[in-house]
Image (cartoon, grey):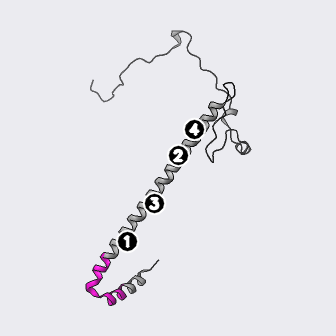
Amino acid sequence: MLSFPHLVVLFVIALVIFGPQKLPELARMLGKATAEFRKMTNDFRYALEDEVRELERQTRIREEEAAAAARAALPASAPVPAPAPPEGAVERGAPAMQELGHVLPESLPAPAPETAPETPQQAVTAPDEKPSDDHTAV
């Protein structure tokens, strides 16, 4: 990138070559050309991203249709295979997680079932009371 002294030297050279009358017009044209170039590159980038998204969507639809056709071809008694995990996902109970000492949800003990009160007398209800206000005059 150009430093400030380099820019000053370029400005002086442009001033000598084009003159003080043409320099503002030249700067204006350069600014418009730069803005148009940025607009064109942004439009191209957005169009390219839209095409990539559309291709991904079509691929996903084809994969879903193939999976549905495969499930329809299986007999009713055959087990249905689990869908493939997303790319980069780690399966539950993976050995790498166990080696690191992480506790997996399957290995936790089941919580004790909560018991409801057997009789209505055991249920405790709070009476509806207004909070006392210490600042009221008596």
| Mark 1 element type | helix
Q: Residue at x 32, y 78 (%)?
A: 27
Mark 2 Cα within 10 Å, few/some/many (few <14, many 20+)? few
Q: Earlier in the sequence, mark 4 or mark 3?
A: 3
The part of the image, by quadrant, that contains residue 19 is bottom left
Q: Between 56 and 83, which is closer to the camera in this rendering? A: 56
Pinpoint residue 73: horizontal percent, then vertical percent.
65, 31
The C terminus, quarter of image: top left
Residue 22 lies in the magenta stretch: yes
The region drawn magenta spans 11-28
Q: Between 35 and 57, which is closer to the camera in this rendering? A: 57
Pinpoint residue 36: horizontal percent, then vertical percent.
36, 68
Q: Residue at x 30, y 30 (%)?
A: 135
Residue located beneath label 2 in the image: 58
**Disc 4 to disc 1, C-alpha distance:** 47 Å
Farthest bottom residue in view: 16
